Amino acid sequence: MASGVSGLFRRGARLLTRYVKAHPIPFIISIFGAAIYAGAAVGTTIILGRITNKVIVPTFESGRPEAKAVWFSGLALLLVGLLRASTIILRRYFAALLTYRTQRDWRRKLAHTYLSVPLKYHRETPTGELLAHADADIVASSEVINPLPFSIGVVTLVVFAVISLATVDWFLMLVAVVLFPLLAIINRMYTSRAEKPLGVVQERVGQVSRIAHESFDGVLVVKTLGREDEEVDRLEGAADELRAARVGLGRIRAVFEPMIEALPNLGIIALLLIGSWQVSIGRLNTGDIVQAAALFGLLAFPMRVFGFFLQELPRAVVVSARLDKVVATPHEPGAATDSPPAVADGPLSVSFGNVSFRYGDDPPVLDGLNLNIAAGSIVALVGVTGSGKSTLCELIPRLVDPDSGTVSLDGVDLREFDPVAVRSEVALVFQETFLFADTVRENVTLGDPVDDTELERAASIAHASA
């Protein structure tokens, strides 16, 4: 178990280092804000101890507060409060900036991957899974950045707190020295048990997204064939599996989170017991106890944030590994040579030489196909569903490559050309159209700089003009 936890933390450290290296400036600024906050927070407890000794206790003894001391105390608390508030804004803003920039980087990488991988990848990967990678997985892989600066600030805060307690009393410092390692041990135990369930939860999220997308995308088929009940049952089953995975993870959190919540409060109780005894024998004064209690109370929330960071770290490691696997998918092959030939202008001939192609382990869709299509000719492909008509058309712009044989364009093997150049000369129009959420012009030109005359000519040929 220890090696597994150490491995998890090493992978988490490498992941966070990668994120920070990509955008170091926001991280440095947020860490600076967290460190200043830690110093200001400890300074607040020192001021409270001084106020207790210089203002509150003398007021109880004399029955009347000293105005000058009250004003100075209020001003000191105000200044420290403003400093803490400004550093909180600094830390949170730049941590969020780092998070969103990291998410942007992931989305750009995924978009590039989705556009660059072979068509085969999209056929084998459910659309819902692709959407889950681009949405839920990216959020899960980067949310760990938000508490990172504060968690590093907690380390600074603990160091300052221990030093401050040491100046008050070494007995009180001993309570802190025992408490903080105990919190770290509990958090390590949690992360070792949560890594695998977190991975299962993310997989189940992708499964639910896939089924929901298939049901929505195929709503016409579902309704036509009366499969509403079957689709509901499929989604219910996937949702039940997701719920069971999350409940299992919730049980793990239910064991460890109360322990993390309770330890700082138990530390305060121990501090009050020891502190009361120290006051009774005259070793400490009331202000020292207030300062120490304020320190422990101050550490309760930061330690919860640190615990949240450790809870998010396993999920980020698991999900980022899933995303890295997607990004590492081999891209579609390019030209066979570094200097590909240019595609000739004008009508082009197409020939298929002993071409075979199959999907996975299924029987061949095309088996030893030989076909020559002269330039400028019109050819009709007629056949039953699944006979390979669409596959043959997809071979021409090299959306897929044949398992064997060659496809030639004007006598040149397609693999010799740059795929982008080939696709600029070949257009596929299937019976199922797709419209982007944009203007008609953009759907026709697809972003190319086409003037109005050329656009109207194309629309006229397609019988789409007014």
Image (cartoon, rainbow, N blue to C red):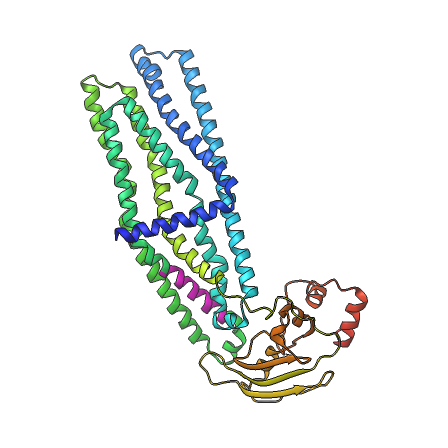
Which of the 4 image quarters holds residue 203? bottom left
Pick the quarter of the image with the C terminus.
Answer: bottom right
Q: How many marks?
A: 0
Q: Nearer the viewer, residue 90 or 420?
A: 420
304 drawn magenta? no
Q: Position of residue 145 (x, y in %)?
A: 44, 46
**Residue plotted at (72% across, 65% down):** 441
Whether residue 230 is visible here, answered yes or no, is yes
Q: Which residue is depicted at the point 32% across and 56% down?
A: 249
Q: Main secondary structure of the magenta part?
A: helix
Percent across and percent down for residue 228 are 46, 75
**Relative height, residue 314 to residue 48 (above, below):** below
Q: Residue at x 79, y 72 (%)?
A: 457
Farthest residue toward the right? Answer: 453
- The foreground one among 212 and 161 is 161
Is residue 1 left or right of 452 when viewed as pictured? left
Q: Is residue 466 visible?
A: no
Residue 367 lies left or right of residue 352; in this view the side is: left
Q: Is residue 169 above or below residue 114?
A: above
Viewer-closest of 368 and 452: 368
x, y percent for residue 173: 26, 28
Q: Which residues are magenta?
A: 200-215
Taking the magenta stretch, the answer to whether it contains residue 207 is yes
